[in-house]
Image (cartoon, rainbow, N blue to C red):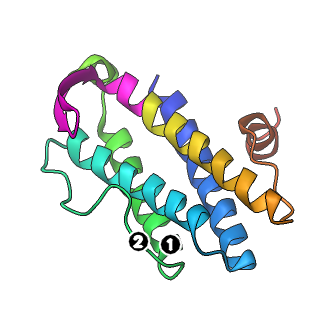
Amino acid sequence: MKSHFIRLLHYDHFANKKTAVLLVQTQVKGRPLEIMAHLLMAQQIWLKRLKMLPAPLTPLWPEWDLKGINEKIDSNYQELSALLQSLQPQDFDRIVAYKSSAGDFENNLGDILTHLFNHGTHHRAQIGILLKADGAELPALDYIFYIRNSIPKL
């Protein structure tokens, strides 16, 4: 299970970086940038929850500009990578208690990680729809394309 989540993390980083390149190329402002900022802030919030630390006090939908987006992507990736590397197989079934704006919840760590990576895919698709409507050429971000091109052939 650990190797599966590490692959998803690498894919998530790849897809976030490709999306950031597109945002910079198009010099986008408005909704696509807001969505990307939300995606990255949500990762930071989940990281804190998984480490049993208080969540950042910043809004879930922060108002960021393009400056620093790549650094935030890399920082989240490095923190998530360190967390995943530290986990043992039984940790993926560990219950994590956390608070959100909707109340108090408990979920196992594996389900939270699955949500985290699916959340990113969902929001990158929203960004893609908005940018394509403005005429941008979108990169292939499907997971299977990433795997075909990133895993060494035997």
Quick one: 150 or 26, which is closer to the camera? 26
Q: Circle 2 sits on which residue?
A: 63
Residue occupying image coordinates x 43% and y 68%: 72
Give coordinates of residue 151: x percent, y percent.
73, 40
Q: Nearer the viewer, mark 1 or mark 2?
A: 2
Measure how far apart labels 1 and 2 are at the Cα level: 12 Å
Majority SS type along the magenta span:
strand
Q: Residues within 10 Å of mark 2 (few under 14, many from 20)?
A: few
Quarter assignment of residue 20: bottom right
Quick one: 63 or 80, which is closer to the camera? 63
Quarter assignment of residue 112: top left
Q: Is residue 69 left or right of residue 11?
A: left
Q: Which residues are magenta?
A: 96-113
Instruction: Tell me, yes or no, whether the highlighted magenta stretch contains residue 103.
Output: yes
Q: At label 2, which amino acid type do we have?
A: Glu
| Above-or-below relation of 86 to 106 | below
Q: At label 1, which amino acid type do we have?
A: Ile
Q: Circle 1 sits on which residue?
A: 69
Residue occupying image coordinates x 39% and y 23%: 111
Give coordinates of residue 94: x percent, y percent.
23, 20
Give coordinates of residue 40: x percent, y percent.
44, 57
Quick one: 76 or 24, which is closer to the camera? 24
Q: Is residue 65 left or right of residue 131?
A: left
Q: Give the secondary structure at mark 2.
A: loop
| Above-or-below relation of 76 to 107 | below
Q: Quadrant of the C terminus?
A: top right
